[in-house]
Amino acid sequence: MVSFVGASEFRVQMMIDRQKIKKLGVGSNQMEFTDFLIEEKGDKTFPDYRKLDLMKVPKLISNTWVLDYRNGIDDGLLFNFSGTKIDEHYGQNITGKKMEEVYKGIFRDEILDCFRQPFLQKKVIHAIRSDKFNDQGYIRDRKVESLLFPCSEDDQIINFGIGITKITSGDEKIEPTFSVL
């Protein structure tokens, strides 16, 4: 069973709630990235993607990715940037490509809906699932856990979403969850 949690009324207060994210049990790299974004946003509600200095967290860059929301979401979710581990997961360089074209997982509709939410609700999302991937001709299972944070240059209009994903190999089956935080 797939659950989609938190589609509640729009209310921006503290956009990144560190304690909520920590309670999810995400990995240390995802918490470090959360702390980095909290620091970088300063007293604003949202971080400004164009002003982020990702070289402050160089070990995390390979697991990060950026969606371009500048033209909205009606024509698809465009990858503005993808780190090397993300490209390896997809089996190609996905920068400049639409998620709808490259994501072939079994939870495709849920992921696409979930990754639209930072633009629509101006909130962080969390997605976790087990999924299949092609590893040099062998179909293998992976656990994939992502956080996606809305970004804004004017603290009002969401123009980018920056994400970090933890990908682990194994046959562990988990209940997929797609949440708005």
Image (tube, helix red, strand yellow):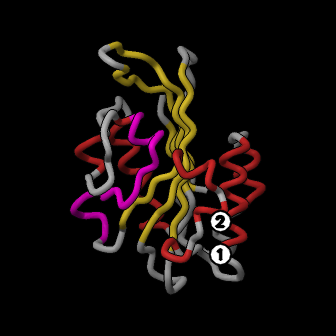
Where does the image place residue 157, in percent across and percent down from the top left? 44, 80
Query: Image check: 38 left or right of 66?
Result: right
Name the residue tied to disc 2: 37
Query: Image check: 61 left or right of 65?
Result: right
Q: Alpha-carbon neighbours of circle 1 within 10 Å: few (<14), some, or many (≥20)?
A: many
- The residue lying at 33 percent from left, 33 percent from top is 91
Where does the image place residue 179, in percent across and percent down from the top left? 55, 48
* 134 relative to 152, above or below: above
Counting every numbered tag in the picture gives 2
Query: Could you tell me the amino acid type at mark 2?
Result: Leu
Q: Secondary structure at mark 2?
A: helix
Where does the image place residue 34, in percent across and percent down from the top left? 68, 58
Task: Look at the image and say whether residue 78 sits in the magenta stretch.
Answer: yes
Query: Could you tell me the amino acid type at mark 1?
Result: Lys
Q: Nearer the viewer, residue 155 or 42?
A: 42
* Highlighted magenta segment, given as a residue range: 72-89
Where does the image place residue 146, in percent across and percent down from the top left? 54, 45
Task: Look at the image and say whether residue 86 sits in the magenta stretch.
Answer: yes
Q: Is residue 179 visible?
A: no
Q: Nearer the viewer, residue 140 or 115?
A: 140
* 156 relative to 167, above or below: below
Q: Secondary structure at mark 1?
A: helix
- The residue lying at 49 percent from left, 24 percent from top is 142
- The residue lying at 57 percent from left, 38 percent from top is 166
Q: Alpha-carbon neighbours of circle 2 within 10 Å: few (<14), some, or many (≥20)?
A: many
Quadrant assignment for the C terminus? bottom right
Q: Residue furthest bottom?
A: 154
Q: Is residue 149 visible?
A: yes
Name the residue tied to disc 1: 41
Q: Nearer the viewer, residue 134 or 71?
A: 134
Query: Is the Cβ of the residue at disc 2 closer than 8 Å to that at disc 1?
Result: yes
